[in-house]
Image (tube, rainbow, N blue to C red):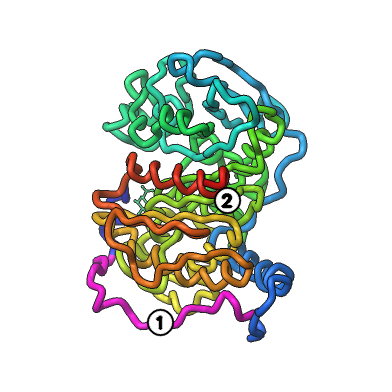
Amino acid sequence: LLTSAAHAQRPKPNYDESQVPEFKLPDPLVTQAGKKVDSAEEWNKVRRPEILELFETEVYGKSPARPENMLFEVTSVKNDALGGKAIRKEVSVYFSGKKAGPRMDLLIYLPAKATKPVPVFMGLNFYGNHTITDETDVQLNGNWMRASKEKAIVDHKATEDSRGKSSSRWPIETIIDRGYGLIAIYCGDIDPDYDDGFKNGVHALFNSKQKPAPDEWGTISAWAWGLSCALDYLETDKQIDTSKVAVIGHSRLGKTSLWAGATDPRFALVISNDSGCGGAALSRRRFGETLHVINNAFPHWFCDNFNKYIDKENDLPVDQHMLISLIAPRPVYVASAEDDQWADPKGEFLSVKYAEPVYKLLGTSGFGAKEMPAVNQPVQKQMGYHIRTGKHNVTDFDWQQYLNFADQHFQGS
Ligand code: GTR
């Protein structure tokens, strides 16, 4: 997905463990002033806000407050979706409260047989809600999309042939059969995934001065902000148990689900699937994708301050284990894939491990794993991790683990 210009300047990635530089990680349990944090109170009052602020100003960028006057419009309801198994709804969220402004569309599947509000998974997708389902009567997204032959995108627009093209990543029937709902949103409804100088998407709604300041929101922050807006809608929907919303994302959208979980404590469970650099992977390892590569290829994802740390990862006041720590004590699950070395599976594992002291301080079961587990051998306590065989993708194996993990934390089984 890199542009050819970015390819040209892209330094050779390191995949050799013996070439990983030596580094010292900042301690999530020592304040910026050097004081050891040894109580939940100190964590919540001092250290957590400090870390959150550092991620806001140095990594993802600060987002504005969410609008209070958003307009929610239910545009379709089908009570016998998926052969009668599911209730399906489409809901438009108008961010400015006016139909003229940008809007995102939620595609919602809920188990038809539910007798009480249900726990749900909510996640962004890459090419529109119509790609996640084989049902052909959901709305075809008309917004700008990244080029993709595989997804039948023509001139940056979805086509009828795009329908269902990502359905293997969203096993809707399995999710429904296990008693969960699913909410899907196209990330580009919130902010199109290209470097446009922040003139479109929700940035345009707030940034009259065109380009955000160096500590203001990039696209990942905007996406996470959009997920929180979606949660605002869910809170108005009586069929959904909003104390049990798991936020899930893959790759760039996995970076986003972690940031959404960190910034919005209403997300009760957080899942990162192959999120890699700027997601779960430790930046200081410089294994696979690095800050250099990611900030050149995707200058719009992070805030401009993040560029300061290109080839200077040791100067970062945080590393990505501290992103995981911001989710504590809520359950968090990080998944890697064996053939996805670009995303640095070991660096993703280590982030979970080095966030564990915070989870322990807050009285949870933590993680437990000291070494990386073997492939396809999930570890699931308050913190979960697996590395599965195969490539950068979301598979049924991944979903089985997420569903088991959710059962454990949402249904007590
Ligand atoms: C790649 C990028 C990764 C990851 C991936 C994706 O090009 O280098 O960080 O975000 O895209 O989102 O699929």
Report how far apart the C-alphas of labels 1 and 2 lie in the structure: 28 Å
**Considering only order in the chain, which callout, 2 or 1, is on the residue closer to the N terminus?**
1
227 or 397, which is in the foreground?
397
Q: SS class of the residue under badge 2?
A: helix
340 or 406, which is in the foreground?
406
Q: Is residue 5 visible?
A: no
User: Which residue type carries mark 2?
Assistant: Ala
Which residue shows up at 47% across the image and 25% down it? 141
The location of residue 246, given as percent across then percent down, is 55, 44
The number of numbered badges drawn on the structure is 2
Q: Name the residue tied to disc 2.
A: 260
Specify the segment rendered in magenta.
11-31
Which residue shows up at 62% across the image and 67% down it? 363
- Residue at the extreme front of the image, as rendered: 413
Q: Was residue 258 drawn as part of the magenta stretch in this picture?
A: no
Query: Where 93 falls versus 284 (above or below)?
Result: above
Q: Residues within 10 Å of mark 2 (few under 14, many from 20)?
A: many
The location of residue 113, given as percent across then percent down, is 55, 21
User: Which residue type carries mark 1?
Assistant: Phe
Query: Where 55 falls versus 161 (above or below)?
Result: below
Q: Name the residue tied to disc 1.
A: 23
Which residue shows up at 70% across the image and 44% down it? 66
| Beta carbon at label 1 within 8 Å of ligand 1 | no
Q: Is residue 161 visible?
A: yes
